[in-house]
């Protein structure tokens, strides 16, 4: 069980986290704004650590914090689509997001002012942050889109309807925190229960996404890992992974509609998880590159597309257009 708590300061995250750890015998992991030039790697290390542990983990802040605070104070994140890639991993492991929110902007500002009298706060003003978190949850169709993942989520309805999210406010749940923790536990058990068991295993790298809610399985060729024991498919903020992600983002496609795999594992062996998923669900397979197309020849291929590295390197293929054609 992995639970992500996120939201502005003064919304009860730490109090809720401590109570959850007591009730669920969970381990607490608090992320900060460190490794400023390697935020993506930092957040990757956190979720890898959580996925390896054989006990519940409560993570205080993850990619939503980078997306919100960067947009509020730095004009946007240097990893604008990080949330998309992190979400692929989150869905694999049945992660639950809990957004700890203020009732409104005014109460957030008041709580923050009170906190500043009790301790040193990193930011003087919290109004922009509170506004963005509320929009991230509720959505706002008129929100200005500046090619950040958070902008698209806000503009297309927010997080409130996502099956792996809950909203916590002190006014509604602060007096019955244990009951809210039971809700978290119940949703986590249900969400993980809907995932195929083998995909929850940390050692089974070569499949991302949630089997129960996805329609498409995107199959690449073979991972080219940058780090030891990091073989997740299409999880690299650069090269083919980023080029594909940019195309999916340009088409405003929802991450929960997709699973991701490579036809071959990092050691060259066939990816048995593809047969495992396809035996349980009839996914529409989209192959990327000739090697993936040949490997999937035993299945009905919904669309056979060029590899993103080919499209990026030679510029002869518009990845957005071929993805649009495949999905539509």
Image (cartoon, helix red, strand yellow):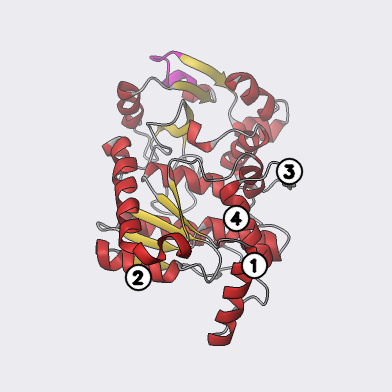
* Residue 170, visible in the rendered structure: yes
Q: Which residues are magenta?
A: 293-300
Q: Nearer the viewer, mark 3 or mark 1?
A: 1
User: SS of the residue at dot 4?
Assistant: helix
Total numbered circles: 4
Which sits earlier in the primary sequence, circle 4 or circle 1?
1
> Residue at 49% across / 63% down in the picture?
61
Residue position for label 4: 134
Q: Percent position (x, y) of residue 19?
A: 32, 68
Mark 1 residue crowding within 10 angstroms, few (<14) / some (14–19) / many (20+): few
Which sits earlier in the primary sequence, circle 2 or circle 1?
2
User: SS of the residue at dot 1?
Assistant: helix
Q: CA distance from mark 4 to mark 1?
A: 12 Å
Q: Nearer the viewer, residue 282 or 157?
A: 157
Label ID, residue 18? 2
Q: Are marks 3 and 4 in contact (CB under 8 Å)?
A: no
Which sits earlier in the primary sequence, circle 2 or circle 3?
2
92 over 44 or under it: above or below: above
Label ID, residue 260? none
* Residue 237, visible in the rendered structure: no
Residue position for label 3: 142
Q: CA distance from mark 3 to mark 1?
A: 21 Å
């Amino acid at each position: 069980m992995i639970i992500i708590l996120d939201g502005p300061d003064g919304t009860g995250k730490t109090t809720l986290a401590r109570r959850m750890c007591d009730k669920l015998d969970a381990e607490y992991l608090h992320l900060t704004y460190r490794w400023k030039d390697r935020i993506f790697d930092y957040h990757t290390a956190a979720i890898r650590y959580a996925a390896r542990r054989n006990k519940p983990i409560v993570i205080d802040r993850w990619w939503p914090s980078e997306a919100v605070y960067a947009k509020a104070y730095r004009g946007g994140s240097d990893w604008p689509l990080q949330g998309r890639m992190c979400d692929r991993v989150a869905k694999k492991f049945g992660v639950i997001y809990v957004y700890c929110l203020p009732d409104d902007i005014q109460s957030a500002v008041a709580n923050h002012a009170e906190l500043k009298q009790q301790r040193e706060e990193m930011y003087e003003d919290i109004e922009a942050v509170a506004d963005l978190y509320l929009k991230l949850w509720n959505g706002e169709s008129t929100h200005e889109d500046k090619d950040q993942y958070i902008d698209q989520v806000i503009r297309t309805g927010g997080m409130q309807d996502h099956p792996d999210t809950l909203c916590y406010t002190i006014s509604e749940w602060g007096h019955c925190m244990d009951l809210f923790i039971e809700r978290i536990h119940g949703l986590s058990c249900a969400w993980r229960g809907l995932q195929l068991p083998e995909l929850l295993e940390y050692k089974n790298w070569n499949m991302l996404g949630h089997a129960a809610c996805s329609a498409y399985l995107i199959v690449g060729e073979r991972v080219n890992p940058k780090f030891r024991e990091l073989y997740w498919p299409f999880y690299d903020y650069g090269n083919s992974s980023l080029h594909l992600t940019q195309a999916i983002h340009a088409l405003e496609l929802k991450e929960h509609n997709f699973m991701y795999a490579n036809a071959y594992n990092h050691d060259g062996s066939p990816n048995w998880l593809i047969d495992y998923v396809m035996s349980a669900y009839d996914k529409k397979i989209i192959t990327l590159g000739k090697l993936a197309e040949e490997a999937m020849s035993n299945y009905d291929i919904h669309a056979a597309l060029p590899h993103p590295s080919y499209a990026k390197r030679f510029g002869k293929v518009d990845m957005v257009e071929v993805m649009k054609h495949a999905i539509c």
